[in-house]
Image (cartoon, rainbow, N blue to C red):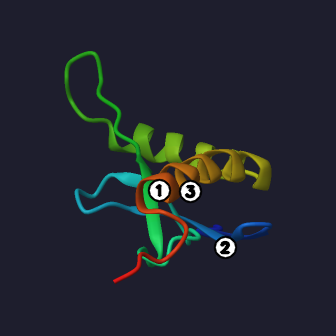
Amino acid sequence: MTQFAKLYETERGQIVVIRQPNDDGNPEIRFFFRTKSPALSVCSMAIAFRTVTAAGEEDEDAAIQKADAAFAALDEEKVKLKVFEQMDMLEEAFGEEEAES
């Protein structure tokens, strides 16, 4: 059975990584996480894969292979590096504390 999801319990909370097709049907790796900001719910970011041949045609098989290889290569340290960077940007933009009414 092919692995399609990974769960990491980190010092900043859970991170779920899922290998799936996106809305356009291209393969993607999507990361789900929460920030400290009460203004935000579960956040996600994605990396989509698309390969085009020299003739300008899409190569779906090559895109799938790239996505699968990238997903297989992900480990906790690589995931934390990218997701923590995104968390920091979101917390800076939306704040870590609940705004007063």
Residue 15, x across and y down, in percent: 64, 68
Q: Quarter holding the C terminus?
A: bottom left
Which mark is drawn over residue 22?
A: none
Q: How many marks?
A: 3
Going by the picture, which residue comes out furthest to the top? 54
Mark 3 or mark 2: whose residue is earlier in sequence: 2
Between 57 and 81, the residue placed more toward the observer is 81
The correct choice, above or below, for 100 with respect to 19 in the image is below
Between 79 and 92, the residue placed more toward the observer is 92
Between 37 and 28, the residue placed more toward the observer is 37
The correct choice, above or below, for 57 with respect to 22 in the image is above
The residue positioned 43% from the left and 37% from the top of the image is 62
Q: For the residue labelled by badge 2, is the local secondary structure a helix, a strand or a loop?
A: loop
Q: Report if the CB atoms under discs 3 and 2 are less than 8 Å apart.
A: no
Q: For the residue labelled by badge 3, is the local secondary structure a helix, a strand or a loop?
A: helix
| Residue that label 1 marks | 90
Q: Report if the CB atoms under discs 2 and 1 are less than 8 Å apart.
A: no
Estimate the spatial distance between the alpha carbons at disc 3 and disc 2, rounded to whole Å: 32 Å
| Residue that label 2 marks | 1
Q: Quarter holding the N terminus?
A: bottom right
Q: Is residue 46 left or right of residue 23?
A: right
Structural crowding at the residue carrying mark 2, measured as other residues with C-alpha within 10 Å and reported as few (<14), some (14–19) or many (≥20): few
Q: Amino acid at mark 2?
A: Met
Which mark is drawn over residue 87?
A: 3
Residue 67, x across and y down, in percent: 51, 47
Mark 2 or mark 1: whose residue is earlier in sequence: 2
Q: Amino acid at mark 1?
A: Leu
Estimate the spatial distance between the alpha carbons at disc 2 and disc 1, rounded to whole Å: 35 Å
